[in-house]
Amino acid sequence: MIHREGIASIVLTLLVAGLLVFLARYFCPDYAIVHYLAYAIAAFILVIVLQFFRNPKRNTTLNDAFAIAPCDGTVLVIEETVETEYFKDKRIQVSIFHVATQRAREQKSNKRHRKIREIPSR
């Protein structure tokens, strides 16, 4: 599935990729290597944009002992901090290091949730 916010970017990327291929074929009709290079660049750009806006279906188990992260990755730190910009109060900050291959590793090992300790509220 693709996230709905990415549709415009994907369409724009398709247009730019198509324009790149068209220009390569129009200005260099006798050079096959230029055509293949244009195809490769267009495909690479399109794959990067599609990967960025992917929205995979998640199967989650609701449990008070689990924290469900808003993205794939590794939880680096869970700490209490003072948020001064909006809430102006003490909050619990969860820092997640986003890794593109983390999801694939989790699916292989079937470990989707990481148990965390509960931080008492004050």
Image (cartoon, helix red, strand yellow):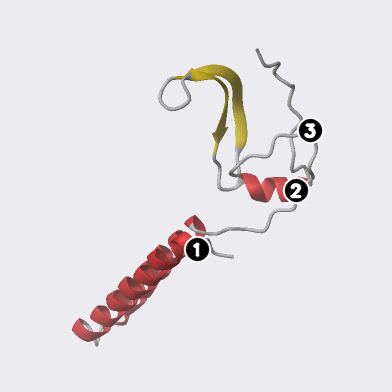
**Residue 98 placement (x, y as % from top left):** 54, 40
What mark, if any, has residue 110 been given in the picture? none
* Amino acid type, callout 3: Asp
What mark, if any, has residue 64 been given in the picture? 3
What mark, if any, has residue 4 been given in the picture? 1
The C terminus, quarter of image: top right
Q: Categorize mark 1 by other alpha carbons within 10 Å: few (<14), some (14-19), many (20+).
A: few
**Residue 95 placement (x, y as % from top left):** 55, 29
* Amino acid type, callout 2: Thr
The N terminus, quarter of image: bottom right
In this view, the residue in front, 74 or 92, is 92
User: CA gap, disc 2 to disc 3?
Assistant: 12 Å
- Check the image and name the residue furthest to the left: 27
The residue located at (22%, 82%) in the rendering is 28
Name the quadrant containing residue 90: top right
Against 53, residue 84 (above or below) is: above
Asked which secondary structure carries label 3, the reply is loop
- Check the image and name the residue furthest to the top: 122
Dot 2 corresponds to which residue? Answer: 60
Q: Categorize mark 2 by other alpha carbons within 10 Å: few (<14), some (14-19), many (20+).
A: few
Left or right, 72 with reference to 83 = right
* Amino acid type, callout 1: Arg
The residue located at (40%, 25%) in the rendering is 85
Q: Are marks 3 and 1 in contact (CB under 8 Å)?
A: no
